[in-house]
Image: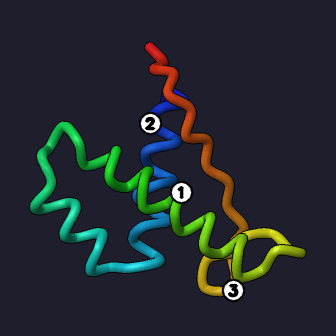
Amino acid sequence: MTTRQVRDKLAAEITRQSSKQTFYIFRFFADRDHVFYAYRCYAYFRWVDDLLDNPNGTPVINGEKEYQLDLSSKDEK
């Protein structure tokens, strides 16, 4: 599995755990080529929101899992 595939899977999982409705809206209604970009954007803003809610700690999903997402614009081959 490439680094990009790992990042895409992580972003999708963060989106799914945070909001199943958003996950399925992206999955079924977003352009197929852009679904993982939508997941990445959602995961990034979820991370920012969690960080603002808990500035002294690690961002978490549902108070449980730590996560980290690299949203660099580099494309791996």
Q: Which mark is residue 74?
A: none
Query: Which residue position is annotated with label 1?
Result: 44
Task: Say whether disc 2 or disc 3 marks the residue closer to the N-terminus.
Answer: 2
In this rendering, is residue 13 above or below 30?
below
Q: Amino acid at mark 2?
A: Gln
User: In screen coordinates, is 33 left or right of 61?
Assistant: left
**Label 2 neighbour load within 10 Å: few <14, some 14-19, many 20+:** few
Query: Which residue position is annotated with label 2?
Result: 5
Label 1's element?
A: helix
Rendered residue at 10%/61% (across/down): 29
**Label 3 neighbour load within 10 Å: few <14, some 14-19, many 20+:** few
- Residue contact at pointers 1 and 3, CB within 8 angstroms: no
Label 3's element?
A: loop
Pinpoint residue 8: horizontal percent, then vertical percent: 43, 44
Viewer-nearest of discs 2 and 1? 1
Count of numbered circles in the view: 3
Query: Which residue position is annotated with label 3?
Result: 63
Rendered residue at 43%/50% (across/down): 40
User: In screen coordinates, is 27 left or right of 14?
Assistant: left
Q: Amino acid at mark 3?
A: Gly
In this rendering, is residue 18 above or below 3?
below
